[in-house]
Amino acid sequence: MAREFTRVGVVGLGTMGAGIVEVFARNGLDVVAVEISAAALERGRATLTGSTDRAVAKGKLAEADRDALLSRVDFQVGLDALHSVDLVIEAVPEHLDLKQRIFAELDRVCKPEAILATNTSSLSVTEISVATIRPNQVIGIHFFNPAPVMKLVEVVRTVVTSADVVADVEALCERLGKVDVTISDRAGFIANALLFGYLNHAVSMFEARYATREDIDAAMKLGCGLPMGPLALMDLIGLDTAYEILDTMYRRGGRDRRHAPVPLIKQMVTAGLLGRKSGRGFYTYERPGSPKVVPDEHTPVATGAGLADGTRAIAKVGVVGSGTMATGIIEVFAKAGYEVISVTRGAEKSAKVCEAVKTSLNKGVVRGKLSESDRDAALGRVTWSATLDHLADVDLVVEAVVEELSVKKALFASLDEICKPGVLLATTTSSLPVIDVAMATQRPADVIGLHFFNPAPIMPLVEIVQTIRTSAETTATARAVCAALGKTGVVCGDRSGFVVNALLFPYLNDAVKMLEASYSTADDIDYAMKLGCGYPMGPFELLDVVGLDVSLAIQRELYLELREPGFAPAPLLEHLVTAGYLGRKSGRGFRDHTNR
């Protein structure tokens, strides 16, 4: 039988601490809420009342329930008030010496059977526990911000934490309505170890001026369905907090360069640019603590309707290819009012593409997203062809053929001879160097990458990939075309993975390495990223959907170009691909899909 907790303590009433107090009190527990001074105590009280008042205003909490919740909280100055609690959780700033001092004092104050817990997100629970004479009763209980909303709790056991203590805390999490994942004491645990490598990588992209802050954030939100872009998330977390977590993980986690804080982060912390809490970080906010972003000197200037200066008029578009991407791109352009010439390798393939476009448009009609007249008009704009010569007078060609460089180069050499001067030549490659394709022509300034995401009619993102030879006019025209399609175009350089894949796949690879090391299970890692970070899919769910062979190929390309040791494909991923376990398409990947 798990022990019954009736009275708990919380030390530190910042955002996290006050949120944890609310979680306990909402679930019928009496809470002793402790701060270091009367002023800090009042700030904590204001944070708690503000949160509960907002819940009432939104209809998520009845006034009577709020009043009952607040009546369960005993606000006190000093640790001596915790003498009778069954469990105490510390939520003070991430400094090891501070936490050790607090735990030594809690060890003296609390009754012998009390459990002492830390909410640390990156420090060693073991190092904190040795400040006490009861390390077997010390455990990590890592809530996620905002604690009343986020469902995940990481329960962190040390090598000496009692099994009874772990079981009691797991039962408590269930009582609180949380999903717990129990793991051992390792730098970053699950969520932060995976999240902060990705965030750090995004900052390095921004620091290198590879893409703008807006484009990096838009790419990950629209391309991966994430709730926030990485730079906006850094601002929410706080750059000082992010730096401390990264630095701790780098020092404790084997000095993996993925966790070595990008120099820009330290520079911004030194300059007081801490994110939302200071009113400025990667973005500028209305005031300190406000979530509202306001324009600053880095905010892109919105262009008005019509063609911006230096852009070319695009009326007729050629699409080369007969696969899923080509079919989707034809539909996107035709629905947006462009005249489209579809070119495939033969009449039979043209007929199949035509049928696929009709089927997709008919689905739009059935679902009420497209009228019959609009469907007919879109189909009427498409000409079906089996010869490249019909592209002689188009304004833009979008290539969507097989992902083989030799094939694409041969095609672009042919387009160079056939197409009129000034035509934009675009490749939809997701992994090959655009410059190699561009240099197969005599007009590299007119060549650009337009990486649509699958399914093209639904996904709102297009990565606009400019090479060192792409002209500003070509890039501006590509931006205008994406806007006319109702897509968000993000501009980036011609580097392996562009934005989305370059940030996404190293994170997936890190998750495989974590599983390979037997640190946690695939289920718990997926839970951690979905419930702790708000990701739409866990890494292993996503890998099985994408295909392990595709994921491995992308990861190999990233590693070969960047030569970053942390990007080397996880051996487990290579072994699964060799064994034919490719994910959903083969019936088995990280999970067995044959009976699902």
Image (cartoon, rainbow, N blue to C red):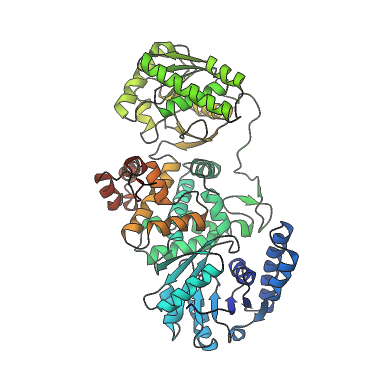
- Residue at the location (26% across, 43% down)? 580
Q: Is residue 570 left or right of residue 43?
A: left
User: Residue 275 location, x and y as percent?
Assistant: 59, 56
User: Residue 435 location, x and y as percent?
Assistant: 37, 30
Q: Is residue 67 left or right of residue 14?
A: right
Q: Is residue 313 visible?
A: no
User: Residue 442 location, x and y as percent?
Assistant: 37, 19
Name the foreground residue: 409 vs 352: 352
- Residue at the location (35% across, 63% down)? 519
Q: Quadrant of residue 344?
A: top left
Name the foreground residue: 348 vs 428: 348
Looking at the image, is 34 positioned above or below residue 354?
Answer: below
- Name the outermost residue toward the front: 595
- Residue at the location (66% across, 59% down)? 289
Looking at the rendered structure, the number of numbered marks drawn on it comes to 0
User: Residue 368 location, x and y as percent?
Assistant: 61, 29
Name the foreground residue: 223 vs 211: 223
Name the foreground residue: 77 vs 154: 154
Q: Quadrant of residue 305?
A: top right
Looking at the image, is 181 positioned above or below residue 444?
Answer: below
Looking at the image, is 399 positioned above or below residue 454?
Answer: above
Q: Is residue 190 visible?
A: yes
